[in-house]
Image (cartoon, rainbow, N blue to C red):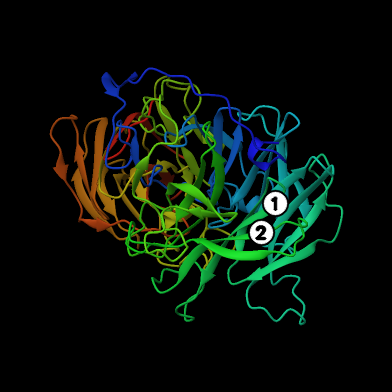
């Protein structure tokens, strides 16, 4: 069990210095670690969001001098990204918990029917030499998977409670004093009785077996609140604390989670000196402030630095006009006042914290770093920055058939009928959902970074394309925008742009084998350019708006499908991404 979730809290192992600059070679280009408008500033301070990309629903597990983070990613595969840090500010990818979303057929390439579901907010724990990851798939229930090494392999998930009883967001705790294990879960209204007249979600604590794999009782209700979820349990100096996210509704015409600045999500804390079951006192400890244009904030994990200072990682919520990068992570100091943890800085002196924009780093001596982005596909394994849109068709992609290149073979697009592709529900939208893109397997992509500026470019070899195939570069989140090549029935290749409603704009004939695609954005406005020699680029297609949707921020990647059958492929030589933020290492 990590030191934060154990009975006593001690001083962590001190940090050791590292080299401040490292280099990598990507497609004959040397890229140095650098700072930007967010993250580590290289002067002992950081600017929030420290992880300015779509890494939502974080949970942190602290083991020794290392901090490990998991975040949700819905229908993307592999699922549940894992990141690590030595200083809480600079985070790098180290893997995924779920190699694939193996527990249900709707996440497979031949269904692609799991949009917005799959991997939701989880809880990461380390106990008696074993790593545990708990999460609730809205459509299937509470599950747990285990590993001896954080980098895997992870076990096949075990379903512990059915979907009929639970909604989301488990949080676990092992009590070494009583030798009992617990999990708290948002059961929403699924078990709610008429006698509970409090509006909102019910949160229950279940006792687990000591090995963390079985539920031993029917659970006990400990709290009900509007949109109350994302609970984490801590025991600090003999006092029980439950951290919860909770909605306040300024406009009841929309649901929690729907973009509406009148609705606010806050972080609350419950406190009990008697028992894990309470009774509990309640206090709001974090609310939206001026730092992020009144964007709501909550849900995350508590950490402690070697100097015993306390810190909290939290996300920014999507009730904003342009959260097109998704839900990023912010780091805030924690001040204990009268036994309550106040998160951030109380800028209006009302006893509740607000997020900080810039602050001193918790731990010094470590270099600027960030998740990987650039790739020359020289490895025989995909980098951790890449994820598939649903589980891929593994026979139809390769890093070894042509060493140094990523090959994406085109499958026939799935049928446009019930059981395939997106469904309309309260967590998604139906705009463009009939488009082939959403039913095309083996789309590979990574997150955009930040919301100011960014430019990505990739080199393609299109010599392997066949009639009726489409392939190239995609940006997508709530909507998609494509630039690539389409091959007609005679084998003629033409450039094309496609918008989110599948409307094509045809371009010039492409005679050679090479195609370079470049896309840039300034804030949420983006465009495409193309080149056949890698030097002279021409704009093609309109300026378009990138959007958050299907609970996903904008992404950069590659697509390949065929309208008639399984035929053709595209090869990707390299991908480079420059953005206004800290640059990671390969």
Q: Choose between 298 and 5: the one closer to the eye.
A: 5
Q: Residue at x 45, y 49 (%)?
A: 564
Q: Quadrant of the C terminus?
A: top left
Q: Earlier in the sequence, mark 2 or mark 1?
A: 1
Q: Quadrant of the N terminus?
A: top right
Q: Residue at x 43, y 62 (%)?
A: 296
What x and y, as percent, mark residue 267? 53, 60
Q: Which residue is mark 2?
A: 271
Examine the image and state in which quarter residue 218 appears.
Answer: bottom right
Whether tag 2 and tag 1 are in contact, CB under 8 A, the answer is yes
Residue placed farthest to the front in the image? 338
Against 86, residue 537 (above or below) is below
Examine the image and state in which quarter residue 392 appears.
Answer: top right
Against 250, residue 372 (above or below) is above
Residue 391 seen by the camera: no
Query: How far is the residue under mark 2 from the one under mark 1?
Result: 7 Å
Q: Choose between 542 and 174: the one closer to the eye.
A: 174
Q: Residues within 10 Å of mark 1 (few under 14, many from 20)?
A: some
| Circle 2: element type | strand
What x and y, as percent, mark residue 228? 60, 66
What x and y, as percent, mark residue 321? 33, 65
Q: Choose between 46 and 12: the one closer to the eye.
A: 12
Examine the image and state in which quarter residue 436 appears.
Answer: bottom left
With 538 as the anchor, is 491 left or right in this view?
Answer: right
Q: Choose between 183 and 434: the one closer to the eye.
A: 183
Residue 544 seen by the camera: yes
Q: Which residue is mark 1?
A: 239
């Amino acid at each position: 069990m990590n030191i934060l979730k154990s009975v006593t809290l001690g001083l962590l192992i001190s940090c050791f210095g590292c080299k401040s600059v490292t280099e990598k070679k990507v497609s004959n280009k040397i890229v140095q670690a650098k700072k930007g408008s967010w993250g580590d500033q290289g002067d002992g301070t950081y600017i929030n969001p420290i992880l300015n990309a779509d890494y939502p629903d974080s949970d942190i597990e602290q083991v020794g001098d290392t901090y490990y983070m998991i975040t949700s990613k819905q229908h993307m595969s592999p699922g549940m990204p894992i990141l690590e840090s030595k200083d809480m500010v600079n985070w790098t990818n180290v893997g995924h918990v779920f190699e694939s979303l193996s527990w249900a057929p709707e996440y497979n390439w031949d269904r692609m029917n799991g949009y917005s579901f799959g991997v939701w907010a989880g809880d990461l724990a380390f106990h008696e030499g074993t790593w545990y990851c708990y999460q609730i798939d809205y459509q299937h229930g509470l599950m747990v998977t285990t590993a001896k090494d954080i980098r895997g392999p992870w076990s096949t998930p075990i379903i512990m409670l059915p979907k009929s009883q639970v909604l989301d967001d488990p949080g676990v705790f092992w009590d070494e004093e009583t030798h009992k294990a617990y999990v708290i879960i948002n059961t929403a209204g699924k078990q709610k009785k008429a006698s509970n007249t409090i509006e909102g979600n019910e949160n229950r604590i279940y006792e687990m077996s000591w090995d963390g794999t079985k539920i031993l009782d029917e659970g006990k209700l400990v709290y009900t609140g509007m949109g109350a979820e994302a609970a984490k349990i801590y025991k600090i100096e003999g006092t029980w604390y439950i951290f919860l996210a909770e909605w306040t509704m300024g406009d009841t015409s929309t649901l929690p989670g729907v973009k509406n600045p009148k609705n606010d999500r806050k972080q609350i804390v419950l406190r009990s000196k008697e028992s894990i079951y309470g009774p509990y006192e309640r206090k709001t400890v974090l609310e939206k402030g001026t730092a992020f244009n009144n964007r709501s904030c909550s849900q995350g994990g508590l950490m402690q630095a070697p100097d015993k200072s306390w810190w909290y990682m939290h996300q920014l919520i999507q009730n904003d006009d342009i959260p097109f990068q998704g839900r990023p992570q912010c780091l805030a100091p924690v001040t204990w006042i009268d036994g309550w943890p106040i998160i951030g800085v109380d800028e209006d002196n009302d006893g509740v914290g607000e997020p900080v924009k810039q602050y001193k780093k918790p731990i010094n001596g470590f270099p600027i770093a960030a998740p990987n982005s650039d790739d020359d596909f020289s490895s025989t394994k995909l980098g951790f920055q890449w994820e598939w849109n649903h589980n891929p068709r593994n026979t139809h992609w390769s890093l070894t058939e042509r060493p140094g290149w990523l090959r994406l073979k085109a499958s026939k697009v799935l049928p446009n009928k019930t059981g395939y592709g997106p469904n309309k529900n309260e967590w998604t939208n139906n705009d463009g959902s009939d488009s082939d893109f959403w039913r095309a397997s083996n789309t590979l992509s990574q997150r955009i970074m930040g919301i100011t500026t960014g430019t990505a470019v990739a080199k393609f070899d299109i010599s392997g394309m066949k009639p009726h195939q489409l392939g190239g570069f995609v940006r997508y989140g709530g909507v998609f925008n494509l630039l690539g090549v389409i091959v007609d029935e005679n084998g003629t290749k033409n450039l094309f742009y496609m918008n989110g409603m599948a409307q094509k704009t045809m371009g010039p004939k492409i005679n050679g084998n090479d195609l370079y695609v470049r896309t840039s954005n300034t804030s949420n406005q983006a465009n495409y350019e193309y080149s056949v020699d890698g030097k002279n680029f021409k704009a093609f297609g309109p300026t378009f708006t990138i959007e958050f949707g299907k609970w996903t921020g904008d992404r950069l990647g590659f697509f390949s499908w065929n309208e008639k059958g399984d035929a053709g492929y595209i090869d990707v030589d390299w991908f480079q991404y420059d953005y206004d933020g800290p640059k990671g290492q390969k």
